[in-house]
Structure formats: C-alpha cells, structure tokens
Amino acid sequence: MSNWKLVNMTYLYDGTFDGFLSIVFYSYTNKTLPQKIVPKDSYIPNFLDKTLYIETDFEKSKRVFTGIEKNISYHTLFYTYYAFLSHEKEKEISLLKYLCDGFDIGPKINNRITLFYVFHVMNMQKRAYGECHRLKGLLRFQEIGNHLYYAKIHPDNNILEPLGHHFIKRLPSQNFIIHDKTRNICLIYNSKEYKMIDATNLKIPDISEEEQKYQELWKTFFKTIAISERKNHKCQMQYMPKKYWKDLIEEPY
C-alpha cells in the first residue's frame, strides 16, 4: 500500500455493511486512505475535521462483495463480515486497510498477522463470531401469545442478523421476535420473511399462561438434576458466561 495517498479527511457513511463496502470501492479506485471512518449518526462534529459523506451504492457494494470472494478468498469475506459486526471503535479503518491490501496481494493477507490491521480484524471477527455461536445455544424463546415467540439478548457485538438467520433456518415455520436490548433493535420473522426494526416504542406482551407452566417445569427439572455437592461456579461460568444469565429462564447458581 506504499503507493496509496493518506488524506486528512474523515469519511462518513450510513453505518451499514453496504455503506462500508461503498467506501472500500471509493478508496480503492482513488487509492486514498482517510484518517477515520465514522458512521454519520455517531459522528461528533469537529472544526478540525474535513469530512466526506459517501453515499451507499448497492451496485458498487455488490461488486466489492463479489470481488472479495473471487480475488481474495471466501474466508476473507467471512472475516470481514463478522469483524464489521464488532462493537469496537475504529473497526472500519482496519477493515479498509485489510481489504485494500488483500486486493493487491490476494489470500496471503490472512497470514500477515504481524500487521496491526490484519491482527485487529482477526480478533474482532473471532469475538463477534464466537458470541453469535454462543448465543445460538443460550437464547431462550418465550411464547407471548398466538404462537408468537419472543427472546431477548444483550450481546456485546451487533450479531442480531446472523443469529436470526440461524433460527430462521431451524424454525422456518415459526413466528418469532429476537430483541437486541443493547442496541434496542428487533428482528421479526413471520414464517416467510424477516425485518429489522427499531424497538424504541415496541411493547412486548406478558408471556402466556401455558408458557408460565412450561417455565416452571423447566426450572424444576433444572434444579432436580443439579447435584449440590458438585457445584462448580468457575466451570459453569466458562460454559455459560455470567453476563448472559439475566436472559435465561433457568436460574444458574
């Protein structure tokens, strides 16, 4: 990337994955690297900053998406997506350098972990994917009426959409809502299609009477199979991290 020009600018975008890929297209075609990349909604104006808002272009985004898999590797596309879901600040600039370098040298980019931005991307994707995988087993649905099921989560990373895709494949004929309480957004699935919505004004009904009965049965079963003499808090927290306990029906001890 020695022939790239560093520009004293902050690139702004809409915060979506397509918006970020549009920035990748712009930077790669112009051979420019900005100082920062920030979602427009979270940008705090600074009179020292020169900003450029880059509109989301779905055609260009698709070209970059396809180009990553074709010219670098599928694994790079996978790493890029999950790293983008990370909650870490300045993830975009590391991802931009990672991809632009990848387009120049190909799949070898994933072996260059001595480069900070490659190392950063690998760490971010590992944590985001790991949390998504963990919640596939820890998420608890509750019936709230009319065969509609609801689950709440408090993830560190923005993994609601890939988590939702997992349950859509597992429960294709079920209506459900998964609520990311950290970001206050919901994924709603009606057995045909799904939609991501802002949950600021969403009111969730109480659980059904039948659901209450099943929850009591589950709690009784959970306590019955426990062997009090063999309590191991450290082991329990290793497999079921304490930060997720508040979203469980059972009561870990």
Image (cartoon, rainbow, N blue to C red):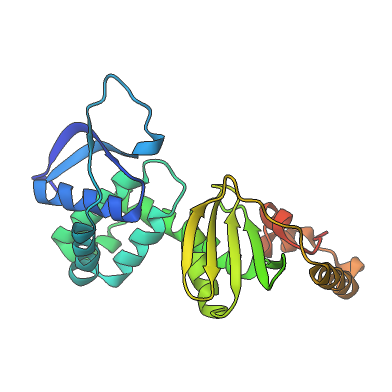
Q: Nearer the viewer, residue 166 or 1?
A: 166
Q: Residue 14, how many percent across, how many down?
A: 33, 45
* Rendering coords of residue 20 (x, y %): 29, 50
* Residue 14 versus residue 73 in the image, above or below: above
Q: Residue at x 28, y 19 (%)?
A: 47
Query: Looking at the picture, does residue 149 appear above or below residue 181?
Result: below
* Residue 154 seen in the figure: yes
User: Going by the image, does 116 lie left or right of 8?
Assistant: right
Q: Residue at x 52, y 66 (%)?
A: 163
Q: Is residue 111 left or right of residue 88?
A: left
Q: Where is residue 177? Give x, y as percent.
A: 59, 63
Depth check: give the residue in front, 87 or 143.
Answer: 143
The part of the image, by quadrant, that contains residue 209 is bottom right
Q: Is residue 114 visible?
A: no
Q: Is residue 112 left or right of residue 32?
A: right
Q: In the rendered image, which quarter contains the C terminus?
A: bottom right
Instruction: Return the residue nearer the eye: 124 or 12.
Output: 12
Relative to 29, is 102 on the left or the right?
right
Q: Is residue 8 above or below residue 141?
A: above
Residue 213: % across, % down: 86, 71
Label tally: 0
Residue at image position (22%, 43%) is 54
Please identify the quarter of the rendering in which residue 143 is found. Answer: bottom right
Check the image and name the residue furthest to the top: 47
> Residue drawn 30% across and 65% down?
76
Nearest the viewer among 118 and 248 is 248
